[in-house]
Amino acid sequence: MSATTEGKIGEKIEFKGNRQGLEVRISGKIPRIQESLLMGWMAAWTFCGIYFMVELATTEDSGLKTFLFISLVFWSFFFVRFGKTLLWRLRGKEIIRIGDGALEICFDFGLFKSRSKYALVNIQRFGIIPGNDLNFMQSLDNSFWSLGGERMGFDYMGKKVRFGKQLGDKELTALARLLDKHMR
């Protein structure tokens, strides 16, 4: 039986590995104050949606009904999107497993999971995706109220695969070395 190595990289990343494989867990947790801000925003957004629904049910004005219906469609889209982000921040984690000639990436939201498996022989150009702090969209992706900001990835049979949500440069470098070592 081979020795198991366990450790942490920064605050968010834990790993456990041996000669047969590696498992890395990247937490989606954020500081308590940011968590409280997200929950407050979700409560306010929910209140607005309920208000729109009550107005839609009670108004007689057809123009206002149309406006409220269209507003609720947009409200619903962002409610689902924001709910997913809140779930990620409360319970979410990325789980990366390497073993048996494959790399598996699992996005675990607590209530549901999304898994993908990739044969190591087909992975090309694995590494850190450079960030640009001057790019508005990348800055937005790295904010705590967003679910983006993946900065690690590879090409797999013509498809780009990204993971490593909102990790700092030091965490990314250490994680890239660890994963690269186990992928060989």
Image (cartoon, rainbow, N blue to C red):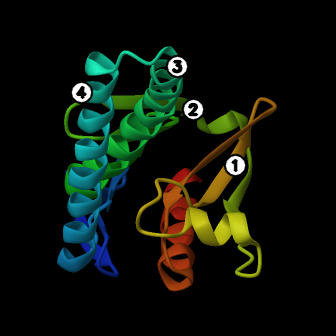
Q: Position of residue 140 (x, y in %)?
A: 59, 66
Task: State the residue at coordinates (38%, 34%).
Answer: 80
State the SS at label 1. Answer: strand
- The quarter holding residue 156 reads top right
Name the residue nearer the viewer: 31 or 22. 31
Among numbered discs 1 and 3, the one appearing first in the sequence = 3
Residue 66, label in figure: 3
Query: Compared with residue 92, is residue 166 higher up or lower down, i.e. above or below?
Result: below
Return the residue at label 4.
54
State the SS at label 4. Answer: helix
Cβ–Cβ below 8 Å for labels 2 and 1?
Answer: yes
- Name the residue at the front extreme: 61
Return the residue at label 1.
154
Q: What separation in Å lies between label 4 and label 3 (alpha carbons)?
A: 14 Å
Amino acid tagged 1:
Phe
Q: What separation in Å lies between label 2 and label 4 (alpha carbons)?
A: 48 Å
Q: What separation in Å lies between label 4 and label 1 (alpha carbons)?
A: 48 Å
Point out the frontmost of discs 2 and 3. 3
Among numbered discs 4 and 3, the one appearing first in the sequence = 4
Among numbered discs 2 and 1, the one appearing first in the sequence = 2
Q: What separation in Å lies between label 2 and label 1 (alpha carbons)?
A: 10 Å
